Image: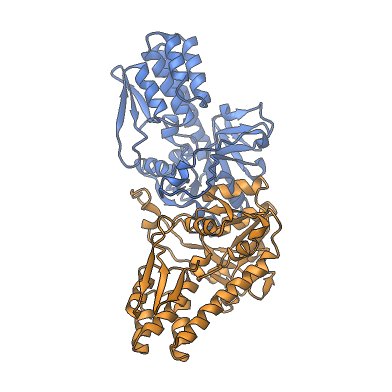
Chain colours: A orange, B blue
Amino acid sequence: MRSLWWEDHKLVFIDQRHLPFQLRFFEADTDVRVAEAIKKMVVRGAPAIGCAAVYGMVLGEEPEKTARRLRRTRPTAHDLFYAVDYMLEHGCSLDAAHAYVETVIDKCRRIGRVGARLIERGQCILTHCNAGALATVDWGTALAPLRAAKDRDVFVWVDETRPRLQGLLTAWELQQEGIRHALIVDNAAGYYMQRGEVDMVIVGADRIAANYDVANKIGTYEKAVVAHENDVPFYVAAPVSTFDRSIGSGADIRIEERDEVEVTRIFDYGPEQVQNPAFDVTPARYITGIITEDGIITP
Amino acid sequence: MRSLWWEDHKLVFIDQRHLPFQLRFFEADTDVRVAEAIKKMVVRGAPAIGCAAVYGMVLGEEPEKTARRLRRTRPTAHDLFYAVDYMLEHGCSLDAAHAYVETVIDKCRRIGRVGARLIERGQCILTHCNAGALATVDWGTALAPLRAAKDRDVFVWVDETRPRLQGLLTAWELQQEGIRHALIVDNAAGYYMQRGEVDMVIVGADRIAANYDVANKIGTYEKAVVAHENDVPFYVAAPVSTFDRSIGSGADIRIEERDEVEVTRIFDYGPEQVQNPAFDVTPARYITGIITEDGIITP
């Protein structure tokens, strides 16, 4: 199942606001409605947002106006702007939109094929956050090798990933794919590594600096350090486009501090001060390899 | 404020089931009622449970019957059995109960004095779980040095400590004591260590093996590894009675696997499989020192 697809002149989304509790769909037959889906987080994950935007450009009647409308939805998602410009250059045709989406999916499929070579029968792999089909339309990045190797009886340890609990989305995807897994609190990942029950870690990436430092969801850094200490290989799976050569090292990556409500809403209680950094940087020295659509890069 | 105290022929507890959301009290004027308080987790933390039990023995009319009743409440809390036996040996007098509790509190106060020597003005200290007054009647273990050093403008990073969120209790205690602090998700602890914003980690201990391996709340191990990697001193604060010489190393400590509901109740959704180990073991090589009432022990 894809996170979104074109059907009967409409764009259909899995409504991620209700996952994993309910599988509901959201239909968009106008550009206004696509913009609403992006803005209200029916769809999340930069590659998936870009794919929604290309169909939004197909549905719009006035390209420049639609472009402005879509660009206003989520100001920080790089793929969104890239996708809108791509469609303006390619005449906003449905064929161009399909081609864009197929390119995104094809990169993920190739990441899966490249990464699957690392996985042996019966191995246990830990992942953090959700870098799956929901974030990338299909296959995902970190989850792509697991899907590609699923006939090898792999087992996945799923970090719940506080504060936003994206691990629930990962568990839901693995369930759809029939891949064995267990959800654990983030605190328990090191415990299983220490006991030798983790053969490999695979995570996604938000941005990769020129020196291969990787910015990803908060907590990735801790997993990488503990994996390194336990001689557990630590892989990052990401398309080549994630590399940002303009950034020298992780020290130059600004870390977003998000609303403390993300932390406190599960207990509905406000301590005096809450800090909520959304990402962290994993230094290249802890990374065994970066799995891309063109092969594995070793920092 | 203490977690429990004797007043007008009754034992009064802070009802920890409602913290940090509400400050409520629970009164016990019979041994049956004390047993209820222990069983229903009005009071938690092995030292505090022991202190409740000694007053339960005072309130009971038939010592052997009361002893059986109290021992049945929480089968795994070592202090409970020790406290009941102590009272049987000392005639179940109120004086004996007060003496027992004062001894527990005095050890914590001494841990505070010993540990406070390590803390310099303005330092930032990270703690995990709750090893505070609530778990030990007063002062706590990991929190005792922070209270003893509070006039030195210390700041505390409080891990929320999934799955049971004992970090909220720690934040509540620090608020009562006027000690500056911020609550963070467990995933963010490494981020602040990496940025040089953590000067020291202090945690409690459930059990310490003969080789100084420390069993404590799940996640402690990860913090210790990441602290070690960042040259952040990592201290364990615990009374000498926490040492269990009968256990050779952490490998011999059985780790309790607890109900998956502890993990899933915050999202009311059941993934196919959830694993919930309650503790982990931190190897002695990551521990800078163990702060006891008799001084600092270096593994």
Would residue B2 be seen by someone viewing this image from the given angle?
yes
Q: Quadrant of the N terminus of chain B?
A: top left
In the rendered image, the vertical position of residue A77 relative to residue A289, given as above or below: below
* Image coords of residue B56 (percent x, y): 39, 18
In the drawing, does residue A248 fall left or right of residue A35? right
In the drawing, does residue A269 fall left or right of residue A282? left
In the drawing, does residue A66 fall left or right of residue B250? left
Residue shown at 67% from the left, 69% from the top: A114
Q: Nearer the viewer, residue B122 or B214?
A: B214
In the rendered image, the vertical position of residue B15 relative to residue B283, given as above or below: above
Q: Nearer the viewer, residue B234 or A136?
A: A136
In the rendered image, the vertical position of residue A223 relative to residue A73, given as above or below: above
User: How many labels, in total?
Assistant: 0
Would residue A248 be seen by someone viewing this image from the given angle?
no
* Image coords of residue B81 (percent x, y): 51, 20
* Image coords of residue A205 (percent x, y): 56, 67
* Image coords of residue B155 (percent x, y): 44, 49
Q: Quadrant of the C terminus of chain B?
A: top right
Question: Which residue lies most toward the front here?
Answer: A8
In the rendered image, the vertical position of residue B28 relative to residue A94, given as above or below: above
Q: Nearer the viewer, residue B189 or A36?
A: A36
Residue B261: name its quadrant.
top left
In the drawing, does residue B19 fall left or right of residue B103? left
